[in-house]
Image (cartoon, rainbow, N blue to C red):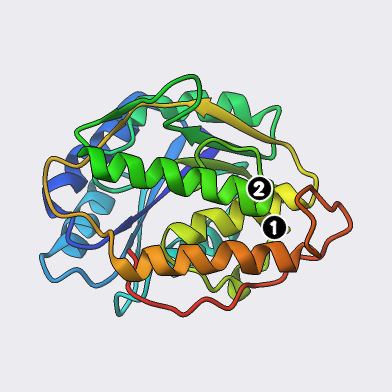
Amino acid sequence: MKRRAIVVVPTYNERANLESLVDSVLGHNEAVDVLIVDDNSPDGTGEIADQLAERHSGVHVLHRTEKNGLGRAYCDGFAWALGRDYEFVLEMDGDFSHDPKDIGRFIEAAAEADLVIGSRYRDGIRVINWPLNRLVLSLCAAKYVQFITGMPFTDPTGGFKCFGRTTLEGIDLAQVRSNGYSFQIELTHQVWRRGLRVKEIPIIFTDRFQGSSKMSKAIIREALVVVWQLLFRNGLRRCPNPGAVAEPVQARSHPGG
């Protein structure tokens, strides 16, 4: 059977979640592979990933030698996927915040879009197990991004997405510099400002029950700066510019994933 889609899952110290996550992805989705991108996790996540790859032909592992950011992990994973024959490339968290049952909805929506974003805030708030201050921070970040860049999306920092193959091929992944939530903003902005089709679908987001969050002050600071860089890259336009050539923002790299 031809594998139509692949889900890229970056990991760092996710041994408590990984096996269940992979089993759920494969169990709920036919013709979908999984690529685990592990940043040399000291808790043995990489070894578990290798065991899963030996057990399942649809599981693949990309080992990175150090932890140098969520954005670079995704870019390396996307490049790996583009080197294979996949029609759709998805990204999702490795901590069960995103429901593997939704993958089919993303692929279905991607038939009529270049990028599909899973939104926690479209048609209401769908967040479980977050403290109020974290929810307020996320909502304010979404409004901030909308106001500065002009992007109309309700959840620009969300990390559950599906890219069409040609959409990713139009992004110079080697030149992407942002790493934390700003990575999510930058890639969405690159797609949107080129005038491509971006669709949001509502999802339920459940915060991790095991492990610890990767949120940090450095990630927040980076996101605050990157949106202004994106605005300038788009010629101060707060609307798509189909003739734009994608250029990287120059955010400082830091451990974001």
Q: Is residue 248 left or right of residue 244?
A: left
Residue 181 x/y as whole percent: 43, 57
Give the SS element for disc 2: helix
Give whichever of 115, 84 is nearer the camera: 115
Would residue 99 appear left or right of 88 to someone viewing this image? left
Which residue is at 52% across, 76% downward?
Answer: 251
Residue 42 placed where, x, y %? 13, 71
Residue 203 percent coordinates (x, y): 41, 26
Q: Are marks 2 and 1 in contact (CB under 8 Å)?
A: yes
Task: Residue 100: name its quadrant.
Answer: top left
Q: Along the line of sight, which residue is nearer the eye, 37 or 248?
A: 248
Secondary element at image label 1? helix
Q: Looking at numbered disc 2 in the image, what kind of residue is underneath it?
A: Arg
Specify the amino acid type for callout 1: Glu
Q: The C terminus is located in which quarter? A: bottom left
Reading the image, the residue beneath label 1 is 169
Is residue 159 something one can see in this rendering? no
Give the CA separation, mark 2 to mark 1. 6 Å
Position of residue 130 relative to residue 172, above or below, is above
In the depicted view, which residue is nearer to us: 219 or 38?
A: 219
Residue that badge 2 annotates: 165
Place residue 226 in its image quadrant: bottom right
